[in-house]
Amino acid sequence: MRGAASRTGVVATPAGGVGGGGDRVAVETQVRGWATLLSLGSCSPWTPGLQAASILPSTRAKITRFGQQPMRPHSLAPGRPLPPAGLSRAEGLSSPCGSWLTAGLCSLTTWTSSPSGHSWGPAWPPRSGLSICRGFQTEKDSLRSLTVSTMIHSLFLINSSGDIFLEKHWKSVVSRSVCDYFFEAQERATEAENVPPVIPTPHHYLLSVYRHKIFFVAVIQTEVPPLFVIEFLHRVVDTFQDYFGVCSEPVIKDNVVVVYEVLEEMLDNGFPLATESNILKELIKPPTILRTVVNTITGSTNVGDQLPTGQLSVVPWRRTGVKYTNNEAYFDVIEEIDAIIDKSGSTITAEIQGVIDACVKLTGMPDLTLSFMNPRLLDDVSFHPCVRFKRWESERILSFIPPDGNFRLLSYHVSAQNLVAIPVYVKHNISFRDSSSLGRFEITVGPKQTMGKTIEGVTVTSQMPRGVLNMSLTPSQGTHTFDPVTKMLSWDVGKINPQKLPSLKGTMSLQAGASKPDENPTINLQFKIQQLAISGLKVNRLDMYGEKYKPFKGIKYMTKAGKFQVRT
Amino acid sequence: MSSNSFAYNEQSGGGEATELGQEATSTISPSGAFGLFSSDMKKNEDLKQMLESNKDSAKLDAMKRIVGMIAKGKNASELFPAVVKNVASKNIEIKKLVYVYLVRYAEEQQDLALLSISTFQRALKDPNQLIRASALRVLSSIRVPIIVPIMMLAIKEASADLSPYVRKNAAHAIQKLYSLDPEQKEMLIEIIEKLLKDKSTLVAGSVVMAFEEVCPDRIDLIHKNYRKLCNLLVDVEEWGQVVIIHMLTRYARTQFVSPWREVDSLPAEPQGKPKNTGMGSLSLLQRIFPIYISSRNYVSFLGDVLEDNEKDFYDSDEEQKEKADKRKRPYAMDPDHRLLIRNTKPLLQSRNAAVVMAVAQLYWHIAPKSEAGIISKSLVRLLRSSREVQYIVLQNIATMSIQRKGMFEPYLKSFYVRSTDPTMIKILKLEILTNLANEANISTLLREFQTYVKSQDKQFAAATIQTIGRCATSITEVSDTCLNGLVCLLSNRDEIVVAESVVVIKKLLQMQPMQHGEIIKHMAKLLDSITVPVARASILWLIGENCERVPKIAPDVLRKTAKSFTSEDDLVKLQILNLGAKLYLTNSKQTKLLTQYILNLGKYDQNYDIRDRTRFIRQLIVPNEKSGALSKYAKKIFLAQKPAPLLESPFKDRDHFQLGTLSHTLNTKATGYLELSNWPEVAPDPSVRNVEVIELAKEWTPAGKAKKENPDKKFYSESEEEEDSSESSSDSESESGSESGEDGEDEEDDHSGDSAEDSGESGSEPEAGKGRAATRSRARGRGDSKDVDKEKENSKTSESSSGESSSIEESSSDSESESESESESESRKVTKEKKKKTKQERNPLTKDVSLLDLDDFNLVSTPVALPTPALSPSLIADLEGLNLSATSSVISVSTPVFVPGKTHVLLHRMSGKGLAAHYFFPRQPCIFGDKMVSVQITLNNTTDQKIENIHVGGKKLPMGMQMHVFNPIESLEPAGSITVSMGIDFCDSTQTASFQLCTKDDCFSVNIQPPVGELLLPVAMSEKDFKKEQGMLSGMNETSTMIIAAPQNFASSVILQKIVNVANVGVVPSGQDNIHRFAAKTVHSGSLMLVTVELKEGSTAQLIINTEKTVIGSVLLRELKPVLSQG
């Protein structure tokens, strides 16, 4: 919530504007680097220009240009000495020196925002004076904790409309206003997906992940491998999902106490402590409807009353004392095909991304081995920590003591160098004519290499060019929708019947007068094939050691479309 | 800001505005309860009342609401007194929530926070390790400076805690205390130093983190722990792995010499053709076998081979020529360097992207260039994960791909762009594709780029055009194609595309100052339609520059633009001025007036830059009396040959940042970024990494004798060095397997460890500088020249001297252990001789049996010098028994109490075609190796023919397992039977050893799976020692169960019989009738295994097992339980 108060802060600064020239020298001594340049500027021959700054916006931009080199964003980079402590929140607004300075900076940064061609790297965010000014007022906390360095300092959860609905600090509190930098980046990015994951601010760095329409923004202060933070944030989201089934704003708000307790356990002083969901669930029980009811009646709690010994054991991923009446172990081999198919139907690139997800509910400490008929296929794999790596290296057998419940045993990648069977083809005929305002649209989907299995759950989506106003189409099966605002066409096909291939035909009405779009839309395909692993991977057998009972074992194969694109 | 404004307002009593704010946010509160109260005061009163009530449910409710407030960033600080009272609550959840509150607000309410301290201090003494740990966690999170001494004390105590979990939390607390009070640095470094020695994987990650925060420059603290960290790495939790790998990367860059020195010394040369001999032949091979080169693995393999073998070859050559010149000596990788590279490799398979990236950067920065290739596959795999991970990984790949194209070339297609990728990902992929472009793949890439240019994402399309420009400049073959393509794009409908093309074409034309009149004419026409300022400016500049080539068009363009001058962008205005000036100089007849008109317009422009420029140009080109000598040169000034702009990757300058860091991502130095130092010219002394155990052994050598052996050093060290280092790679495998051996030491408390180290150091200090080679050669030399008696004498003296140095000594254990060690070395002799035989004949002098021989044994492995104890665990224990005070553990193997005659079928006669085999465990220390379990196999011939040549064929052992097979049996008569012994090192696991039993004609696959009880060796121990050891193996090292059985089963003889039947344990004499104790150690690692059966009232008994090897412990528990409970 970027409250009204913060807005007024911004309004106040330019008002303080050009006054208070007498204090400049004092400021200069305190604010090294950039401030020096500003005050120098005021005595230089082009002083008149400074006054003009308040009159002509364009000229103002010009002035600051003289300071171009040293004043480039780098000069404001976090490595720089901090502004003086005197510029605390209150003073920043009231004292003439403070406001002069901030005003100067505002104009400075206005220049920075002028388009500078195409920036490839992460753009330097503080493009408007607004953020800099505010950055100043709130640096009190970080000043004190300058020597403090911790991996993850704070976490903010921000929804798509820009409200911070949860904050958690593992160290001294970092003001919410730090998120303003994030909001700016968000505005600039137009789409949520394009918000850069790493945003530097004068004294902090904001690392974010975007999932389930929520931004998880971690605030860090010092050098840290960015993937470390990003991976951790993803783990947080996974944990929430595991706890609550879905991870959405209302759910997090409803379970704010559990969320807080979980976060408290996951990080200690900004360093990950317990990230295995098995252990976390021992520490803090996930809420269920039954437990919620019981808790409200009896006043008992979510916090586990036993101590989590699993955390201390040699198999830290498995909780202790697991008991089931039905002992069962299910494995899902799921493969996704990522492919780009070109206009003519030939494959440009195709890869298979496979995972084996397991749901293991076995009593005690079972030791499982899983072997494959053709383990050679798996030459690029990553494992859950429970898998004994050396055994895999020597025998190509997966040997592991599984965590309790659902987990991803391994994921593998069959790269583009191998030949990948493409199970579907798309015939398309999409044409725009220059003269008429109508275009033709026709696509047909058919099975290709399916190993005799049926293709189900087919959906076709396509982002139509902006020029398309509407489409009138008739599908031979399934339903279709076209959103005239986002220009997104989606066609829910369902099953493919090889005897009667599904097709979608019709016309597109184009904007009158507009020239024809120069690109045909790409078609994205989704489908599912049950009981087939397209790479040919087959599980040979699953054995259990260490326990006496006979478990129920099950294995399922499935092939799905990953990022499957057809260019037209 | 908003939260602050609330905070301020609330403290001042809460005005109208605040209320509104509260109302607004309260609608999204979880319980909805906030909405009920109209003002803060009231609400907080209510919460206070709830907190004061004596019902836990009310308190809990209040706490939950307070946590909700904190989560929303609202101020709840005024509730502090009411909340802090509940810190000692019995209810765990209330307690936890109070902790959350306390940590959040303690800083603001320091005095009140002190009230809670005593609670934590009490909890720090709790017998439960988890409670101790969490107390330390909260205590250290309270940022109140007054309690610094208390925290310090708590951390100190916790760092010596028996539980590794508590020690882990102590490591976390170090950072917290440091940030609270940096003055404590020195003290904290001491604790870090101590914790770095910790062998628990739980602690390793956290303490390295603390090290990085507190004293990253104290690299000297790492030396002694380097090998241990390398070996533990795989088992550390994933977050710790990342931190350790980053730290070790920095370490390696300061401690080892560059593995790519040759390449470095020739920076101008592309890395494809290095001068270095090894690499040279690699590229030669690449030329010979072009097919294999596509597979990166193969290349890296080749690299490996070449590095190890060829080096030897060339070394010997060079050695003769310039033995003295150290600088020119070819590179041989330090075994420690190799160790790090090897041990991190498996982590490329981690599911954690951060770990994979960390390993990748390690390989990039410290591995030989030929080996870095293996990381590319893993990095490409990461591209499938979330967009954030992709973003970081792609950035790093972009930097890598500039320097070493070859690494990612096979994965070119993985970087193809999908229309659904976010723009930032698309642009990064494009960057990589450009970096990877070469003559071979450019045509494919250009076709791909054509698709991208048409993309609906215009920012991306524009980036593609730039890319095409870059390809055109870097690959001259296609520059014309690219230029033509770009010209075609000029007729594109999209203005952004056209504008970008214009800009790029301008740059290209500038680089190729040939005649491109047609293109320029075409572009001049575009000026009518195009509105993007940069593009217009570019066209104008281009025409001005080539005005002599397009003499007809240029003045016309000037005429047109003069008309529109006032409405043009500043950028364009400047170029119009330039064009005017150039035309004035070359074609003043046609354009004089036009130019003057433009100059007049410019004179009154709003923009002073333009006014300045106008003034300047006028003075320069229009001759008047005031203009100086400069105007003569005006033409030269304006129409000089301009250098072409360089189109290069924005990732070009990023490589000076360590990959995978935040600084690299941002391309600016982030706070706290630690530079990766350059490789040292000469490697610092590698012996600093030698660990105490080795020095302990060294101590045994009298100093005088070492000196005498010095001449030997020359003889061996030079010629053998290379060989040793290559050998080391093969050796270390077994060593990493045996590293658990040193775990046995863990049990001894820190004090004794320290003293051992001290004495070790004092003895070896003088030679330490001479490095490892010296020690090695000395040891080697000694082994061959001295006769037995002298050795024995030496050992006696050193033994006695060490005995003297320790004040207290139990004579009984002394004699016992001495005899023990003698037998130990006896057995070793056998193994060693075997080893020697297989190894080489270079050292023909056979070794005699002596205690000191183990020093010699040591040298086989010291070149790698992992933190492996050179001595067997039991021997270490013996040594410690000798020269350490009586506090150290006494583990001495005794004879088995009982040897069950039970045999297991190895091969049934039906499946063995008449050959039957049975095996049984004789429970004797194995003669083949002290980590092996001895197994006796009885072979029977049930056929009526001779079975010939019975031997062990192929072995299929799990990692780390080793097997010593029996000698082949030439023949077995019909109905004959023969018993042979084998030794199998099961690595303390119940995994099966599979191998093939072969006869002359057949092979049979057989398995030996050891019962857990056979993985033990009995230990003799006093009751006192037992209790002490048991005390140290509490907590997570303890497993127990209750047994219910008929009373007659609990007769002591019955229990004894049952237990020794199942497990090979020794009986500990017990003073109590109702407690039976048994002690053993695991064969492989020598960890203690303590079994206690405590009879309770009625027919129950408790079975307790204490051991560090918790897995075996629990398996043993499970096996013993049914045995004890059944009649």
Image: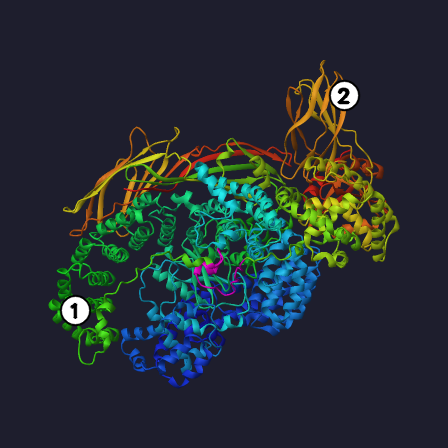
Q: Nearer the viewer, residue B375 or B18?
A: B375
User: Is disc 1 surrounded by few (<14), some (14 to 19) or many (20+) residues within 10 Å?
Assistant: many
The image's mark for residue B584 is 1
Q: Which mark is residue B285?
A: none
Q: Nearer the viewer, residue B1075 or B857?
A: B857
- Residue B132, position as x, y percentages in the image: 67, 59
Q: Which quarter of the figure is the C terminus of chain B placed in?
A: top right
- Classify residue B371 as left or right of residue B575: right
* Number of numbered discs: 2
In the rendered view, tell whether residue B438 sits above or below residue B71.
Answer: above
User: In the picture provided, is B612 more to the left or to the right than A377?
Assistant: left
Numbered disc 1: secondary structure: helix
Residue at the far bottom in the pictured view:
A22
Q: In which quadrant will I find the N terminus of chain B?
A: bottom left
Please indicate whether residue B969 sits to the left or right of residue A203 in the image. Answer: right
| Mark 2 crowdedness (10 Å alpha carbons): few <14, some 14-19, many ≥20 | some
Pick whichever of labels 1 and 2 is earlier in the sequence.
1
Q: Main secondary structure of the magenta part?
A: loop
Label 2 sits on a secondary structure element that is strand
Inspect the image, locate mark 1, and give the three-letter code of the amino acid beneath it: Tyr
Pair 1/2: label in front = 1
Q: Position of residue B741 (x, y in %)?
A: 71, 46
The answer to if A309 sits in the magenta stretch is no
Residue A34 spot, x, y in % from top left: 41, 74
| Residue ID for mark 2 | B977
Question: Disc 1 versus disc 2: distance between alpha carbons?
Answer: 114 Å
Magenta span: B656-678
